[in-house]
Amino acid sequence: MSTDVDPSAPRWRRVAAAAGLLDPDGGVRATVFAEMSALAARTGALNLGQGFPDVDGPPAVARAAADAILAGHNQYPPGPGVPALRAAVAAHQAARYGVTLDPDREVLVTTGATEGLAAAVLALAGPGDEVLTLEPYYDSYAAVVAMAGARHTTAPLRATPDGFRLDVDALAAAVTPRTRLLLLNSPHNPTGAVLRRDELEAVARLAVAHDLLVVTDEVYEHLVFGVEHVPVATLPGMAERTLTVSSSGKTFSFTGWKIGWVTGPEELVTAVRTVKQFLTYVSGAPFQPAVAAALTDPAALAWVDDLVASLAARRDLLTAGLRDAGFDVVPPDGTYFVLADAAPLGYDDGVALCHDLPALAGVVAVPVRAFTRPGSPAGTALRSYVRFTFVKRREVLEEAVARLRRLRP
Ligand code: PMP
Ligand code: GLN
């Protein structure tokens, strides 16, 4: 499926259209996350829309950033990122996944995962190329593919009794001679699916058979509940063709710091660095040493383990509450999102429910439609779904669940 936009329109309008932000009257909206957070602020509703924690990360890590400011880490850091952070990322990938990386040539620090993904797509795809993603997909993917002037194609994740699963045959069918890049995401926003080893092996076989490059968004790599996160770069034939993108925002609950990184073979990392240096050049000088310390500090990593345990419990709380309210829920194995089908409540359109939800129940959610292409089969299948985040304090979730009970038919 592809979004057809007037090819003579300025590029930014095509980007807005690809991201579903162009109104029929020509107006341009902000992202769904900004829109829904503004709706929450306006109505005083509990914001279970935009995914950001309402408790900050480890105080010792925050203190390390404050210390770095006072110690004078306030000018441009090195283009590829401060050496300590590149070394820490390499050490993290080695300790956790057995992946060996040269911190000087195979690790690049970026302004959040968002910039890493954008720079990778801009570096590797252009007019005439297709970039294949899962659907639903994180909203920035469609926008950066449009910025690159490439064509966005998708393969669906489907709701099954076993959670959202990749339709491997549909993925294979979506590959064409023009497919240049496979842009993966696991653990997956918005479904909370964690792709299993067998699903990823099928993806890897396809990538090798068609000589595709793979960019994999693994920002939720730590946030998995009793299942294994398999980095696709660890599968046979993948290391040499895969760029792995991650970030400190989700792992350490500092989403506003925007410290991310891209790892992979030197040639591909060089391609991304070449673009990245003209997007932001560098950023986050005092945050980089703080994240470096966090990635290598056993106490900070223990904090992440506690976060994961607490998130699993909060997932269970919200999942049970949504079911109690009358939604059909597909429980997630990772991330901090859960998808709920509003059809049993009489809503066949998640967008309509999200607009009504503050008045009906004093809660804000995000329609899954924001993560799908207009008119696509996946978008149609998920039309009545909405996304809730459970990365909010337990008492907020308890209050939300109590309020959502008002929806019960
Ligand atoms: N990818 C996914 C799947 C996300 O959910 C987010 C979240 N916000 C990002 C990328 C962006 O990460 P960052 O804030 O590090 O840019
Ligand atoms: N990743 C967050 C989410 O999916 C939001 C990030 C953003 O607002 N761009 O909710």
Image (cartoon, helix red, strand yellow):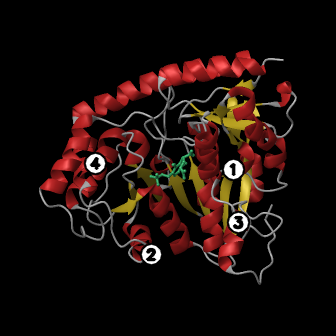
Q: Position of residue 20 (x, y in %)?
A: 73, 59
Residue 382 placement: quadrant? top right
Disc nearer the start of the sequence (2/4): 2
- The residue beneath circle 4 is 291
Distance from disc 3 to disc 1, alpha carbons, whole Å, reads: 17 Å
For residue 275, the mark is 2
Distance from disc 2 to disc 3, alpha carbons, whole Å, reads: 27 Å
Distance from disc 1 to disc 2, alpha carbons, whole Å, reads: 26 Å
- The residue beneath circle 1 is 371
Distance from disc 4 to disc 1, alpha carbons, whole Å, reads: 30 Å
Q: Residue at x 76, y 56 (%)?
A: 373
Disc nearer the start of the sequence (2/3): 3
Which quadrant would the C terminus be assigned to in this image? top right
Amino acid type, label 3: Val
Q: Residue at x 53, y 36 (%)?
A: 335
How dense is the environment of label 3, judged by Cα within 10 Å: few (below 14), some, or many (20 and up)?
some
Q: Nearer the viewer, residue 74 or 3?
A: 74
Disc nearer the start of the sequence (4/3): 3
